[in-house]
């Protein structure tokens, strides 16, 4: 039997980055690996002090390194990342979840060597990081969100102190930090104890009657709980002062990022949300990116600020809207094996812009718009969490199209959306009937 000659061409991995180095980031020390032929000791340990980081950068320059990969660990990578970028290195921030180590004993030395080897073969991709001029806006916006969360906790502390005094104000007034709630709480801290006087401070829009408010304001007025209420109110006011200072910094940073002139066209009149900045944020965001993202139903100025602060107005780093929605973590998953889709679940991703878009999508529940009709149709097909993700995915695609193409969004309306959906369903039914050798006839013709 003749033996068949089989010529098998096996193309091995080629080195794409011969001058690559890798850093395993730690809180007190960093392990650095360079190509073995660059130094007699290719793996070294450096401290995390500034003088140590400068020695690290000098050593990489001596070894003729031009690209550096590092694992993202907390916030410890930021000083080294900024220093290496200022020195002219190309730095890639690698997600630790996406870097699989070889089996065997794990150590920091093996980690940095494995990263250096993967980087030299071009098998690593860097995480997205906005331009340097956008990073201050992102940091300020995140600081503002942290202050809002802290302020909300102090509101809970006020509610707890009132409950301990058996003051049931939250049962008759829905918002403790509204106009009526703040007047009553501040009067209590100032020393007022008469329920009739306190109930007389209610606004005319409060649905509860004066007698109900009087009943809710009869408590024990213990000193320790009044002290806790006073401190919670002072902390709440302090956070408000900090928020005002943060808004001033954000406004100054937005002035630096202005690249367009003019003002956005008048759209739907929306009430200003309580937590939104007090300055004209909508106009400044328009002058930053050239389009008005708040014309999209569900997207308010706070959502637009979070999205633009996380990515900036330039989305050229994302080749398509699919890459953008994948980075956000709102696109369907692609777990496919053997030609069978195993799961379409979205990946777990703690993305602040995605969280803001999900909250905007949830606000579409009662919107009489095309997006609102789409969200309600998704809710009828799947559970609410998946419908919110699907609507957030659609919002992200609209934002990508507006920022990359400069087009303004125009709502086609709920009726137009329902009509187009009905036409698509009818066309699909006609095509299925034609495939089965049948003809779909409208009911009017059969009658």
Image (spheres, helix red, strand yellow):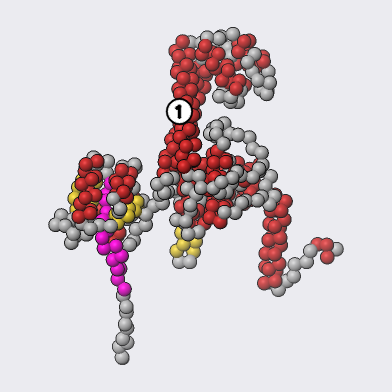
From the image, give the main secondary structure of the stretch colored magenta.
Answer: loop
Judging by the rendered image, the residue that carries numbered circle 1 is 242
> In the displayed structure, would residue 166 be above or below residue 410?
above
> Which residue is depicted at the point 67% across and 72% down?
435
Q: Which residues are magenta?
A: 11-25
**Is 83 included in the stretch rendered in magenta?**
no
Asked whether residue 321 is in view, the answer is yes
The secondary element bearing badge 1 is classed as helix
Q: Is residue 55 left or right of 185 when viewed as pictured? A: left
Q: Is residue 13 magenta?
A: yes
Left or right, 99 with reference to 279: left
- Front one among 12 and 171: 12
Give the image location of residue 266, x and y in percent.
66, 43
The image quarter containing residue 368 is top right
For disc 1, the neighbor class at 10 Å (few under 14, some 14 to 19, many from 20) is some
- Of the 4 image quadrants, the one containing the C terminus is bottom right
* Quadrant, the N terminus: bottom left
The correct choice, above or below, for 422 with respect to 255 in the image is below
Residue 51 in the image: state x and y as whole percent: 21, 41
Q: Furthest-front residue in view?
A: 261
Tell me where residue 188 sits by quadrant.
top right
Rendering coords of residue 272 (x, y %): 60, 34
Q: Name the residue at 58% across, 14% down.
A: 217
The residue closer to the viewer here, 56 or 87, is: 87
Q: Position of residue 415 (x, y in %)?
A: 72, 51
Q: 300 or 184: nearer the eye?
A: 300
Residue at the image position 54 percent from the left and 47 percent from the top: 260
């Amino acid at each position: 039997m003749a033996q068949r000659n089989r010529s098998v061409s096996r193309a091995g991995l080629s080195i794409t980055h011969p001058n690559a180095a890798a850093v395993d980031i730690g809180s007190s020390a960093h392990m650095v690996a360079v190509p073995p032929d660059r130094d007699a000791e290719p793996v070294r340990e450096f401290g995390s002090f500034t003088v140590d980081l400068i020695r690290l950068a000098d050593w990489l320059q001596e070894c003729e390194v031009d690209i550096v990969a590092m694992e993202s660990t907390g916030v410890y990578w930021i000083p080294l990342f900024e220093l290496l970028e200022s020195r002219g290195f190309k730095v890639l921030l690698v997600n630790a979840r996406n870097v699989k180590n070889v089996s065997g004993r794990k150590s920091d030395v093996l980690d940095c060597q494995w990263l250096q080897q993967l980087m030299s073969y071009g098998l690593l991709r860097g995480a997205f990081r906005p331009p340097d001029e956008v990073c201050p806006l992102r940091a300020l916006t995140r600081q503002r969100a942290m202050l809002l969360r802290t302020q909300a906790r102090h509101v809970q502390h006020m509610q707890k102190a009132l409950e301990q005094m058996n003051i049931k104000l939250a049962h008759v007034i829905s918002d403790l930090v509204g106009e009526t709630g703040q007047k009553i709480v501040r009067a209590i801290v100032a020393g007022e104890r008469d329920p009739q006087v306190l109930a007389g401070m209610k606004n005319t829009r409060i649905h509860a009657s004066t007698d109900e408010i009087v009943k809710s304001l009869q408590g024990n007025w213990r000193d320790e709980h009044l002290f806790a209420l006073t401190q919670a109110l002072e902390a709440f006011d302090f956070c408000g002062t900090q928020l005002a200072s943060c808004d001033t910094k954000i406004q100054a940073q937005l002035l630096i990022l202005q690249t367009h002139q003019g003002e956005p066209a008048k759209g739907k009149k929306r009430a200003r949300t309580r937590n939104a900045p007090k300055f004209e944020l909508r106009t400044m965001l328009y002058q930053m990116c050239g389009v008005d993202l708040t014309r999209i139903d569900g997207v308010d100025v706070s959502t637009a600020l979070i999205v633009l602060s996380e990515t900036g107005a330039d989305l050229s780093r994302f080749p398509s809207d699919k890459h953008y929605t994948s980075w956000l973590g709102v696109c369907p998953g692609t777990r496919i094996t053997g030609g069978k889709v195993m799961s379409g679940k979205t990946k777990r991703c703690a993305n602040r812009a995605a969280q803001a878009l999900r909250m905007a999508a949830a606000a579409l529940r009662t919107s009489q718009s095309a997006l609102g009709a789409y969200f309600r149709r998704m809710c009828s097909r799947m559970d609410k969490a998946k419908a919110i993700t699907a609507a957030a995915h659609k919002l992200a695609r609209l934002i990508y199209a507006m920022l990359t193409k400069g087009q303004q969004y125009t709502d086609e309306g709920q009726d137009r959306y329902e009509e187009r959906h009905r036409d698509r369903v009818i066309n699909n039914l006609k095509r299925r009937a034609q495939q089965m050798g049948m003809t779909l006839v409208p009911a009017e013709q059969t009658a």
